[in-house]
Amino acid sequence: MYCPYVKINNKTKLTASYVKRRNSEEPYIQIRALNGVPLKAREVGLILYSHDVLKENNENSTDADWELISINSIPEGEEHIPIGPVTMMRNQLDLIGGTKAKYTSDEWAQSIRFWQRYASINIK
């Protein structure tokens, strides 16, 4: 199994887009790699949210107790993938689309460090 990420190096071509996930959310700058080889996955994790959490922002799509939100793969050589800085910001500031949370300065630094070394590959 492979990750949708590439390791950034001096040959990586990056693109930035000004996007939003939903009309009600603030836009953000999304960075994608235009080239590179997808990395082998060390493991795959499933992100589930409870019905109650999703219902808080009217984001539930079913009445099930849990919904699968994301399938995340971790590149070989990494222990985990930190939450992205944009998601952390949305959560910590309790913005629309976020799930209220507080992060330590180390969690912020680890997130920024990781996402300076890896990029999602542009799939179009």
Image (cartoon, rainbow, N blue to C red):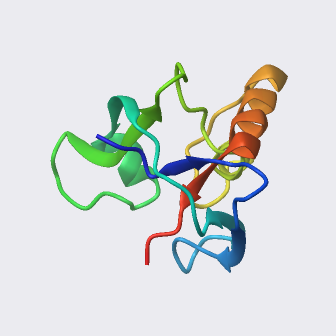
Q: Quadrant of the N terminus?
A: top left
Q: Is residue 121 left or right of residue 87?
A: left
Q: Position of residue 49 (x, y in %)?
A: 35, 40
Instruction: Name above or below for residue 49 compared with residue 94.
Output: above
Along the viewing direction, whichever of 29 and 60 lies nearer the viewer: 29
Residue at the spot x=39%, y=61% of the render?
58
Q: Where on the picture, by quarter, is residue 124?
A: bottom left
Q: Residue at x 52, y 19 (%)?
A: 79
| Residue depicted at 29% across the width and 44% down the height | 51
Number of numbered discs: 0
The x and y percentages for residue 109 are 81, 30
Give the percent coordinates (x, y) of residue 66.
23, 40
* Horizontal arrangement in the rendering, residue 91 relative to residue 49 (left or right): right
Percent across and percent down for residue 7 are 62, 44
The residue closer to the viewer here, 92 or 14, is 14
Is 67 located above or below residue 59 in the figure?
above
Does 120 appear above or below 46? below
